């Protein structure tokens, strides 16, 4: 009697159940994955488009930008320009994975292995997710956010709420604590604290903005600079210190900030997250086949999808759209396993763990302790660089030509590694703009300064600055390398 | 450990976002809608479901971003084939490096456009923004009624061809069951009694006793049983009282078809502006008429010194020279009505737009034909555009309106006039039906 879990391509709930059980066994025994409980949800294409529009979050407040996103994507989808992802997975406990109803059974198997075990394990174990996000509280918090913003719309009008959200979204990428670990979220606590905050905030602010002459000598000198240190989290600073912002607006800033913070690690670990999930599904599908649980046909269908996802077009290919995180991440995790199992002399020179008999330990360590930038610095091996034919190109704006600064050869490996890590760091980080001073005792002007040196898109910066200004309520200045933008108070 | 949930039935949740998107681009949508109102066909507008494209740059979300087009940068690329360290690759002409990267375009979306689909109501809201749509009358005055045959249950007599077999057999069966039940019960009792009597006879015979009395009672019972069985058999399988006939009845039924004649002067004196006024007027009337009837047909008649039926495009596009005669248009309307839209089967509306120019001797002809035409119309709307003083034609119409309240006249010289005008037209008309 055949042990095949399925032989034709229609999925049923019973089959998904059986496949999930088989995958769970492999994930636990062969890969020793530690995961959140899984919640698999079957959704339609329309619902997948909805989920896209709200960055994959299952519950989200309403805003026109999500409507725009959806209109663009559903247009592209209808015209056949864009395929939908086969799955979407949410960093929550239980871990929610969306499976599209159009998927074949083989595809559902792949998706469950990839999302419900690969991504799930990554969410639960990667140190950045552990420190920066709260999988327990997120669903509750999103519901609180949706309720609260709906309540504000009712009370203050949709347009007023939209204005605040527009402004908050503009600086949401600069609303993340990169160095300090945020507090855990809890919806109930959040609700209570919100009310408290609203009550005391104005009181506290009056203290900061007191304009009456000081009545004792203990008052800080008027010249003392505020804030004492530059602040990188623009949303946080404005929420706490804007002179005349109403309580509900502060709360909305807080919601945008919390969600940006929750999403922050996903951008930091794209290559690792996808690479690890691909590594997991690759192992699981082969193991299912080796055990005789899936047919050769299923394995072939899997190969077709897998190679499509991990395909890296060359830089001169019209399909090229940057480095494919799936391709790079998968290649690197596979290579860690190879370095353990069959190290070459070169590997031994590059990696201390080469030849480690326990490849699982090495994979787990890599998956837990790094983010994309450090992962590349630590693990990008000469072999992967050679396989992908990586090379570095540099641009000097004054020169007539680009220059090849390194290629995949002995003299270039180190350089390439660092260049790629640098590139990843820059693309995942917004320009570093910090609040350096507030003229607290005078005209209340807010001064921002760009700390890094890469040029900003000027008119974008100007528009963004006017959003900052709409929140702050007084003049706002942005000092850059060689010029300065300002947004005076006009309204 | 794993839960599987079927979410497909919970539908999409995009409405709230969609609403907010429309609010956001309301001004632009309004421009687009008004453009459609000028260029689109009247029927398309009334059933508007066309997507309106909004360029994404209108919906751009700014943030602090890098702009590396003129900066020095370094990138790692895959797929090296022949380059060695130190090779130089000339920059594309005038491209500034932006051709090879998508980072330059906001959101990575390029010049995509967002398509927004408006429902008919949303469309009207935008078209009449700032003006509340009036409560159009729910029923037009004195809708034409036509008798229509309708099924009306079942009756006990009728023509054999309308006999309803199912109902008839049902009645017959019920009657048979009812009439037999009592007799059957009685028969059951008699059969029981006969059984006991027979046993008694056998007992007595066995004991050697006399059974003559019992035999007599037995034959009496047999007689009774035979009589009952005969009666049961005599109940007819079908009786005249069982017959049922499907009944049909005549009922008055409103006519739900309407036709709207649009008559417009296309002589040289009617310019773009006048036509725009006319189009809005026709559109509003069409929408009004359309709310009342299942189907509305439109007939376009243009006229200068002669009148002809034409397509909508030709109607609004036409500009023909020559003098103006109104009577040919009225006569043509009459003819078309006679041939294709008999007033006892159609609700006929006539909407006429003119600048009032008419050859003065023609007014008498117009009057004669209107007197003939008006009793068969539901309404005649006459709009005089862009004139400082009332024309002779308008004065004629106003005189006729004294006797025929369904003739409604108005004047307008600006686009903005049309809608309030329309509202007053229907406000006055609303009075009688609500008092």
Image (spheres, coloured by chain):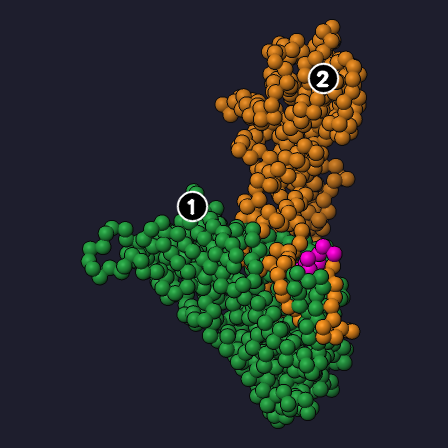
Chain colours: A green, B orange
The residue nearer to you, when weighing A47 against B113, is B113
Q: Which residue is mark 1?
A: A489
Q: Quadrant of the N terminus of chain B?
A: bottom right
Per the rendering, the mark at residue B269 is 2
Q: Residue at x 55, y 46 (%)?
A: B24
Q: In the rendered view, would you say A228 is above or below B289? A: below
Q: Magenta span covers which residues? A: B93-102
Residue A74 lies, in percent from the top left, at 66, 55
Residue A295 percent coordinates (x, y): 74, 80
* Residue located at (41% from left, 64% from top): A230
B135 in relation to A199, above or below: above
Q: How many marks?
A: 2
Give the structural element (helix, strand or loop) at label 2: loop
Marking on residue A192: none
Disc 1, SS? loop
At 61% from the left edge and 49% from the top edge, which residue is drawn?
B57
Q: Is A345 drawn above or below residue A416 in the view shown?
A: below
Where is residue B167? Give x, y as percent: 68, 47
From the top left corner, tell me how far across and down residue A147 is, in percent: 45, 57
């Amino acid at each position: 009697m055949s042990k095949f879990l399925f032989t034709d391509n229609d999925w049923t709930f019973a089959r998904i159940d059986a496949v999930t059980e088989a995958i769970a066994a492999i994930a636990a025994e062969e890969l020793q994955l530690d995961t959140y409980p899984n919640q698999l949800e079957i959704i339609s294409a329309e619902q997948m488009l909805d989920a896209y529009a709200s960055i994959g979050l299952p519950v989200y407040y309403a805003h026109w930008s999500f409507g725009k996103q959806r209109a663009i994507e559903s247009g592209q989808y209808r015209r056949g320009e864009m395929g939908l992802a086969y799955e979407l997975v949410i960093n929550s406990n239980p871990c929610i994975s969306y499976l599209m109803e159009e998927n074949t059974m083989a595809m559902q198997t792949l998706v469950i292995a990839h999302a419900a075990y690969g991504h799930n394990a990554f969410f639960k174990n990667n140190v950045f997710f552990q420190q920066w996000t709260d999988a327990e509280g997120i669903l509750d918090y999103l519901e609180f956010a949706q309720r609260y913003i709906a309540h504000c719309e009712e009370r203050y009008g949709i347009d007023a709420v939209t204005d605040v959200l527009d402004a908050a979204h503009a600086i949401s990428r600069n609303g993340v604590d990169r160095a300090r670990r945020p507090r855990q979220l809890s919806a109930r606590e959040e609700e209570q604290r919100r009310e408290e905050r609203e009550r005391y905030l104005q009181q506290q602010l009056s203290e900061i903005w007191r304009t009456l002459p000081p009545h004792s000598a203990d008052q800080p000198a008027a010249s003392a600079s505020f804030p004492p240190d530059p602040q990188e989290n623009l949303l946080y600073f404005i929420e706490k210190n804007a002179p005349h912002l109403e309580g509900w607006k502060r709360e909305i800033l807080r919601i945008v900030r919390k969600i940006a913070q929750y999403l922050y690690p996903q951008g930091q670990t794209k290559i690792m997250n996808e690479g690890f999930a691909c590594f997991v599904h690759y192992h699981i599908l082969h193991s299912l086949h080796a055990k005789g649980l899936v047919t050769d046909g299923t394995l072939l269908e899997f190969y077709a999808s897998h190679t499509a996802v991990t395909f890296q077009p060359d830089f001169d290919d019209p399909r090229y759209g940057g480095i494919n995180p799936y391709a790079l991440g998968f290649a690197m995790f596979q290579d860690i396993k190879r370095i353990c199992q069959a190290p070459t002399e070169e590997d031994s020179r590059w990696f201390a763990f080469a030849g480690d008999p326990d490849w699982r330990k090495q994979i787990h360590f890599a998956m837990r302790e790094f983010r994309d930038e450090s992962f590349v610095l630590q693990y990008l091996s000469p072999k992967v660089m050679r396989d992908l034919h990586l090379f570095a190109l540099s641009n000097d704006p004054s020169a007539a030509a680009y220059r090849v600064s390194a290629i995949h050869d002995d003299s270039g490996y180190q350089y390439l590694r660092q260049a790629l890590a640098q590139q990843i760091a820059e693309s995942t980080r917004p320009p570093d703009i910090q609040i350096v001073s507030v003229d607290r005792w005078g005209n209340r002007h807010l001064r921002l300064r760009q700390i890094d040196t890469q040029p900003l898109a000027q008119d974008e910066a100007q528009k963004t600055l006017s959003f900052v200004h709409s929140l702050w309520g007084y003049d706002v200045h942005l000092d850059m390398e060689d010029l300065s933008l300002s947004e005076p108070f006009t309204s | 450990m794993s839960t599987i949930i079927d979410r497909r039935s919970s539908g999409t949740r995009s409405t709230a976002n969609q609403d907010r998107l429309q609010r956001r681009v309301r001004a632009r949508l309004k421009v687009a809608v008004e453009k459609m109102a000028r260029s689109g066909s009247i029927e398309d507008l009334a059933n508007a479901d066309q997507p309106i494209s909004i360029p994404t740059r209108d919906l751009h979300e700014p943030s602090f971003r890098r702009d590396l087009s003129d900066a020095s940068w370094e990138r790692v690329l895959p797929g090296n084939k022949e380059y060695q360290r130190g090779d130089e690759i000339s920059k594309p002409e005038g491209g500034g490096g932006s051709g090879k990267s998508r980072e330059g375009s906001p959101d990575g979306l390029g010049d995509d456009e967002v398509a927004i689909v408006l429902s008919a109501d949303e469309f009207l809201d935008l078209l009449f923004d700032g003006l509340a749509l009036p409560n159009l009358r729910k029923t037009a005055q004195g809708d034409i009624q036509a008798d229509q045959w309708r099924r009306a249950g079942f009756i006990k007599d009728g023509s054999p061809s309308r006999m309803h077999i199912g109902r008839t057999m049902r009645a017959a069966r019920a009657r048979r069951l009812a009439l037999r039940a009592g007799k059957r019960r009685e028969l059951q009792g008699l059969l029981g009694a006969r059984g006991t009597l027979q046993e008694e006879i056998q007992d007595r015979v066995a004991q050697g006793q006399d059974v003559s009395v019992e035999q007599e009672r037995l034959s009496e019972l047999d007689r009774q049983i035979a009589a009952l069985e005969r009666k049961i058999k005599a109940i007819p399988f079908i009786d005249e009282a069982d017959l049922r006939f499907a009944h049909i009845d005549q009922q008055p039924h409103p006519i739900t078809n309407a036709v709207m004649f649009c008559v417009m002067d296309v002589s040289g004196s009617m310019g773009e502006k006048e036509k725009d006024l006319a189009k809005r007027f026709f559109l509003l009337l069409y929408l009004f008429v359309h709310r009342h009837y299942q189907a509305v047909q439109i007939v376009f008649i243009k006229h200068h010194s002669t009148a002809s039926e034409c397509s909508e495009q030709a109607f609004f596009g036409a500009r023909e020279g020559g003098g103006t005669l109104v009577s040919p248009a009225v006569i043509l309307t009459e003819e078309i009505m006679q041939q294709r839209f008999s007033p006892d089967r159609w609700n006929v509306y006539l909407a006429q737009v003119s600048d009032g120019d008419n050859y003065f001797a023609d007014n008498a002809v117009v009057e004669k034909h209107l007197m003939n035409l008006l009793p068969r119309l539901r309404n005649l709307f006459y709009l005089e555009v862009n004139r400082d003083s009332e024309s002779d034609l308008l004065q004629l119409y106003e005189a006729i309106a004294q006797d025929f309240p369904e003739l409604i006249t108005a004047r307008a010289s600006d686009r903005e006039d049309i809608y309030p005008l329309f509202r007053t037209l229907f406000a006055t008309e609303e009075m009688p039906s609500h008092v």
